[in-house]
Amino acid sequence: MPSTLLKFDNLHNIRDLGGIQTGDGRRIRRGRLIRCGHLANLSDDDRFLLSQMLSTVVDFRTNQERNKQPDQEIPGVEYHHIPVVDSLTAGITREEESDKGAVALLLHKPKEAKEYMCDMYSSFAMGKYALSQYAKFIRLLTVPRDKAVLWHCTAGKDRAGVATVIVLELLGVSREEIIADYLYTRECLAEDILRLSAMYKKQEGTDSPLADESLRYLFSAEEEYILTFYNTVEQKYSNMDTYLSEGLGITQDEREKLRELYLEG
């Protein structure tokens, strides 16, 4: 089963990993690990619910994204900024001003749009900066907390999606289940993708089917993207375990700590 979509007023891709089953038959604890998009447009009810649920928020966005759309403060919640890329040239972010150049360049080039996104996922797997930042995030998760940790980028799809893949791998979830949860993002973001596509097509004055295809590649979660991440890991490190231990530097003790904290039984 994939992660559970939670109901909030102004959060459309907020999901609890609780209930996902591991390879040994255990399940992730509910209310401990949550993935999401940005927290810039919370309603009062959203802020209250998050204050009851969370101990920690991790923001993977760049400084420029955060300045454009700062997360709203949530009472009693600690905040960690761990940017995964050091510039917005690394990919589509869902932040309108930052995306305009990339979208205009790729709007009628679906093949290039897909390649652009695949290159971004490859950089998540092998870029030194991304490796160091994801390692920092995982070590933050090894600290016991009373409530949940929530991590997010802008849409909760790419940077947060890869972070979720890493967490699920460390907890022993099968690759089949991990990919299924990644692809569930398409359903969770379906309305946002339609809205964004309409907005960009109107801005560019086009109704071309090529534009529809390009925008789907830029804003959706495609299986080819996550397979590119896995393939890049295996090309550079031979297998996922080596990526986790040598690429990210996660020790066996840290893995066992994560499973102790976040798995039932």
Image (spheres, grey):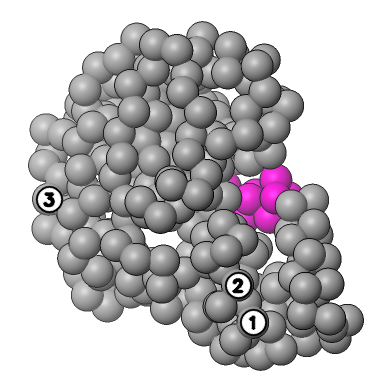
Q: CA distance from mark 3 to mark 1?
A: 39 Å
Q: What range is drawn magenta here?
A: 179-190
Q: Nearer the viewer, residue 248 or 159?
A: 159
User: For mark 2, what is the residue?
Assistant: 100
Pointer 2 with pointer 1, Cβ within 8 A: yes
**Is 78 left or right of 222, judged from the image as shown?**
left
| Amino acid type assigned to the residue bearing label 2 in the image | Lys
The mark nearer the N terminus, 3 or 2, is 2
Q: CA distance from mark 3 to mark 2?
A: 36 Å
Q: Nearer the viewer, residue 41 or 216?
A: 41
Location of residue 224 (image quadrant): bottom right
Location of residue 109 (image quadrant): bottom right
| Amino acid type assigned to the residue bearing label 1 in the image | Ala
Label 1 crowd (10 A; few <14 / some 14-19 / many >=20): some
User: For mark 3, what is the residue?
Assistant: 249
The residue sitting at 31% across, 40% down in the picture is 81
* x and y percentages locating residue 258 in the rendered image: 26, 29
Whether residue 20 appears in this view of the structure is no
Label 3 crowd (10 A; few <14 / some 14-19 / many >=20): some
Task: Reply yes or no: does residue 185 show up in magenta.
Answer: yes
- Looking at the rendered image, the disc whose residue lies closer to the viewer, 3 or 1, is 1
Whether residue 137 appears in this view of the structure is yes
Task: State the SS at label 1.
Answer: helix
Q: CA distance from mark 2 to mark 1?
A: 6 Å
